[in-house]
Image: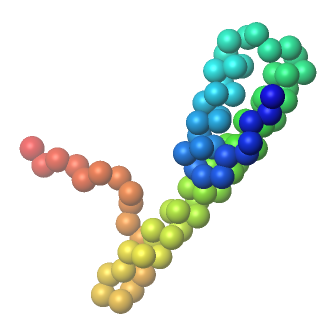
Amino acid sequence: MAQPKAKDFAGKMAELEQLVAQLEAGELSLEESLKAFEGGIRLIRDCQNKLTQAEQKVSQLIEDNGQLTEAPLSPPTSTE
């Protein structure tokens, strides 16, 4: 039974994890594996697009003295 398409990032990631588990289990036929792989590729592309959009939005929201500046989204390093 086909699952309804996930609409949000978390739902797509959960669906992708489920597809990976099915593929890793090795219990799918070749045709089913190919369909699962194709679906996984679509989900990966969708998630990558969402992440790129979010990154662009964050970059636009970070401002320094009225000028748009980009800042890395990594945690600060400790100074020990």
At x 42%, y 70%, the residue is: 70
Whether residue 69 is visible: no
Task: From the viewer's perspective, tell me whether residue 62 is left or right of residue 19.
Answer: left
* Foreground of the two, 15 or 50: 15
At x 58%, y 64%, the residue is: 53
Task: From the viewer's perspective, tell me whether residue 62 is left or right of residue 5.
Answer: left
- The spot of residue 45 in percent (x, y) is 70, 48
At x 85%, y 26%, the residue is: 34
- The spot of residue 37 in percent (x, y) is 78, 30
Q: In this view, does 29 lie above or below 66?
A: above
Extreme residue toward the bottom, this view? 66
Task: From the viewer's perspective, tell me whether residue 44 is left or right of residue 14.
Answer: right
Extreme residue toward the left, this view? 80
Whether residue 20 is visible: yes
* Foreground of the two, 21 or 57: 21
At x 32%, y 81%, the residue is: 64
Task: From the viewer's perspective, tell me whether residue 4 is left or right of residue 61.
Answer: right
Q: In this view, does 62 lie above or below 1?
A: below
Q: Is residue 3 above or below residue 49?
A: above
Q: In which quarter of the image is the C terminus?
A: top left
- The spot of residue 33 in percent (x, y) is 81, 22
Q: Quadrant of the N terminus?
A: top right
- The spot of residue 72 in percent (x, y) is 38, 60
- Count of numbered circles on the image: 0
